[in-house]
Image: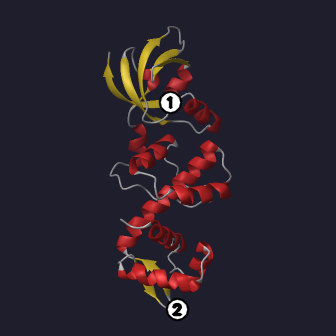
Amino acid sequence: MASEITEQYLKVVYNLTEDGVAAKTTDMAKTLGVTPASVTQMLHKLARDGYVKHEPYRGTVLSPKGKRLAKKIARRHRILERFLNDVVGVGVDVGHDQACKMEHSLGKEAEETLCKMMNHPLYCPHGKKIPKCERAVECEKCIEDGVRLSDLEEGNEAVVSHLVSRDKEELCRILAMGFVPGTRLRIEKKLPMGGPIIVDLRGARIAIAREIGAVLHVTRQGSG
């Protein structure tokens, strides 16, 4: 397993070479806040490990092995930035610093959940494209997975999959109610005439409006 510093270096090379130009040692040093000599030393190690191809005075590019890992880290970082900015409300610069700390420990399942919850964002707050995940399923199909909570019947059990909303305040409100992706729930009662839906969420009975039920997408687990 690659170390955090290896992942950090590979992500920087990835960012600097997205336009097809080799990464310069001086640019890497400026981005990482270290000396060019330290960068050169680390690049030699990464080259020995098969992550990059480094030529003095010509720059550094990622090998296929390095690019696979770098894309994963860049994807996690940019998804976290999007989440921190759009859902948590953290500023762009602070969100970047926080994402740098969190990207190395974010698991695959959590990454997929965040991506679904935010309806598969295409760009990070800085305008950089978020690399696609390695799943064979197209993003559009992934979004379509599951059913709306409002379409379930009384007694149905399900797990929250994702929220289909571009409204930041609405997303925060629903998440604050406890409807976090991965949470199990049960439909207790659907009141007539378009009335609210009574949901058992972790032992608590919550009444939600039909409009919220249409935003919440779930994976059906069974019925009572």
* x and y, in percent, of residue 127 in the image: 60, 59
In this image, 164 relative to 188: left or right? right
Residue extending furthest toward the bottom: 57
The 10 Å Cα crowd at callout 1, few under 14, some 14 to 19, many 20 or more, is many
Q: Closer to the N terminus: mark 1 or mark 2? A: 2
Identify the residue at image location x=50%, y=8%. Answer: 192
218 to 5, vertically: above or below: above
94 to 146, vertically: above or below: below
Identify the residue at image location x=47%, y=47%. Answer: 115
Residue at disc 1, secondary structure: loop
Q: Which mark is residue 179?
A: 1
Residue at the spot of label 2: 57
Quarter of the figure with the C terminus? top left
Residue 35, visible in the rendered structure: yes
Identify the residue at image location x=38%, y=66%. Answer: 68
The amino acid sitting under disc 2 is Tyr
The amino acid sitting under disc 1 is Phe
Which quadrant of the view contains residue 86? top right
The 10 Å Cα crowd at callout 2, few under 14, some 14 to 19, many 20 or more, is few
Say which of marks 1 and 2 sits in front.
1
Depth check, front residue: 162 or 102: 102
Q: Are marks 1 and 2 in contact (CB under 8 Å)?
A: no
* x and y, in percent, of residue 196 in the image: 54, 14
In this image, 88 relative to 42: left or right? right
173 to 31, vertically: above or below: above
